[in-house]
Structures are given as C-alpha cells and as structure tokens.
Amino acid sequence: MTRVRVCSAAANDYTEALCWYAERDSDVALQFEAEFEGVLAEISDAPDRQPTLDENHRYLPMRRFPFLIIYRCSGNSTTIVAVAHTSRSPDFWHSR
C-alpha cells in the first residue's frame, strides 16, 4: 500500500467537480465523493496496476462519472496530478 497525495491543482479539480454536482443534486455529490475515495484506495493498493498515459503517468477512470484520475508514482509515494473531465482538453494538466 502506497501513500497517496493529492496535489493542490488536482484538489481544485476535485472541488470544482464536487461543487458542480452539489449544486445540482446533493445525493449525486455524495456518490461522487464516495467513488473518488474508492478510486484513491484502489490506486493506493496497487498503483502499478493501472494503464500508463505516458512514461511518468498512469490513470484510473471513475466508473460512474466522466473523470480520469491521473497520477504519477515515485518510490512509495503516489501523487494525484489531475481529476480530469473526459470532455476537457487532454493536455490541460501537463504542466503540473
């Protein structure tokens, strides 16, 4: 099990998405929050199991929501670098 850290930019991505869902339906927002926590646990359990995006990054799609959780591993640490909506420009997070 590796330690998972969410960088500030990814935390902003997450918060923006959570707020968007909360404005529309609080139950759906809770489901989004629960699924995100589940994805973080899945990444923590086996970060190398997910497909690669490039030589430094991997991703895990959320099952019920149109988001990819993009992360990179370094030793025993994993950093979430983006909570990327699948309709958003795929390169927006590259500078992180």
Image (cartoon, rainbow, N blue to C red):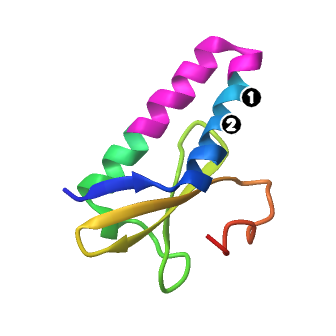
Quarter of the rendering occupied by the N terminus: bottom left
x then y, percent, for residue 60 = 49, 57
Magenta run includes residue 48 = no
Counting other residues with Cα less than 10 Å from the Cα at mark 1, is it few (<14), some (14-19), or many (20 or more)?
Answer: few
Is the C-beta separation of discs 1 and 2 under 8 Å? yes
28 shown above or below 42: above
Q: Tell me if 29 is positioned left or right of 2 in this view.
A: right
x then y, percent, for residue 79 = 42, 62
* Label ID, residue 17: 2
Quarter of the rendering occupied by the C terminus: bottom right
Marks 1 and 2, Cα distance to the nearest angstrom?
A: 5 Å
32 shown above or below 10: above
* Label ID, residue 20: 1
Q: Name the outermost residue toward the top.
A: 26
Magenta run includes residue 31 = yes
x then y, percent, for residue 26 = 64, 13
Q: Tell me if 93 is positioned left or right of 58 in this view.
A: right
Amino acid type, residue under disc 1 in the picture: Trp
62 shown above or below 7: above
* Label ID, residue 56: none
Counting other residues with Cα less than 10 Å from the Cα at mark 2, is it few (<14), some (14-19), or many (20 or more)?
Answer: some
Where disc 2 sits, the SS reads helix
x then y, percent, for residue 82 = 59, 58
At x 56%, y 52%, the residue is: 8
- Magenta region: which residues? 22-37
